[in-house]
């Protein structure tokens, strides 16, 4: 059986009305009309208001309002109290439950060891061939400032060698660094470089504009 929303939508389309026209005529917002036609009652206000929408909508289309409300009450009751599905259908008795056997336990341990081994190899590979981690949170690139000094703040690998504009800078135990530098030109290029023990380099460049 058709829903009240389907009845309203079909009649509207048969009479070549758009939802915008229905909204203008009934003073019901378009998004509420769309929800009503789709039967999405969770997006609509309480039933008392919905019944008022149906009556106004049906009256505009020339439909029997009492029949529309009767369809709505049946439909809303089913929406609010859906049929129950017996547990025997959702959990069949012949469904096999997972059981942990010695073979499965051993397989899980072996799989875990293989994953750990390959993860270790990946980290070693990254350490040997990849550049060190380097993040520069300040200054922002393309920064405009009136101050002749700024702070360069960031973080790198604790064991990496850090330099700013070819000047070596110290980092703390966690790899954090803060360094104040002086701006001398209208356009200042700042080069931050982190070098790992294996000689791999990661570089970040920032440009700061000094307004004099």
Image (tube, helix red, strand yellow):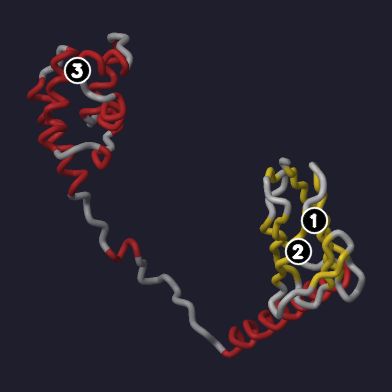
Of badges 3 and 1, the one in the foreground is 1
- Residue in the image at 74% along x and 65% along y: 179
In this view, the residue farthest toward the right is 199
In this view, the residue farthest toward the left is 66
> Image quadrant of residue 39?
top left
- Quadrant (top left/top right/bottom left/bottom right) for the C terminus: top right
Q: Is residue 58 left or right of residue 103?
A: left
Disc 2: which residue: 134
Q: Secondary structure at mark 3?
A: helix
> Image quadrant of residue 126?
bottom right
Q: Secondary structure at mark 2?
A: strand
Disc 3: which residue: 26
45 or 96: nearer the eye? 45
Q: Sequence order check: which comes first, mark 1 or mark 2?
A: 2
- Estimate the x, y position of residue 111 in percent, counting from the top left: 68, 80
65 or 85: nearer the eye? 65
Label 1 with label 2: CB-CB less than 8 Å:
yes
> Image quadrant of residue 127?
bottom right
Q: CA distance from mark 3 to mark 1?
A: 61 Å
Check residue 204 in the rendering and tell me which mark sits there, or answer none: 1
- Estimate the x, y position of residue 207 in percent, counting from the top left: 77, 47
Q: What number of labels is visible?
A: 3
- Residue in the image at 19% along x and 47% along y: 80
Q: CA distance from mark 1 to mark 2?
A: 8 Å
- Residue in the image at 10% along x and 21% along y: 65
């Amino acid at each position: 059986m058709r829903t009240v929303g389907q009845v309203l939508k079909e009649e509207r389309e048969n009479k070549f009305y758009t939802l915008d026209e229905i909204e203008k005529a009934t003073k019901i917002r378009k998004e509420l009309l769309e929800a009503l036609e789709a039967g999405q009652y969770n997006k609509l206000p309480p039933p008392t208001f919905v019944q008022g929408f149906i009556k106004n909508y049906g009256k505009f289309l020339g439909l029997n309002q009492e029949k529309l409300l009767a369809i709505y009450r049946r439909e809303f009751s089913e929406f609010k109290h859906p049929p129950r599905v017996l547990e025997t259908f959702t959990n069949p008795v012949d469904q096999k439950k997972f059981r942990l056997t010695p073979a499965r336990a051993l397989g899980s341990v072996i799989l875990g060891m293989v994953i750990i081994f390959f993860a270790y190899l990946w980290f070693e590979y990254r350490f040997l061939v990849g550049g060190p981690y380097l993040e520069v949170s300040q200054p922002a690139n393309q920064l405009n400032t009136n101050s002749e000094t700024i702070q360069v703040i960031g973080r790198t690998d604790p064991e990496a060698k850090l330099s700013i504009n070819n000047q070596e800078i110290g980092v703390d135990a966690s790899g954090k660094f803060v360094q104040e530098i002086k701006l001398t030109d209208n356009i200042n290029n700042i080069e931050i470089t982190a070098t790992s023990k294996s000689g791999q380099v990661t570089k970040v460049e920032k440009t700061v504009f000094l307004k004099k």
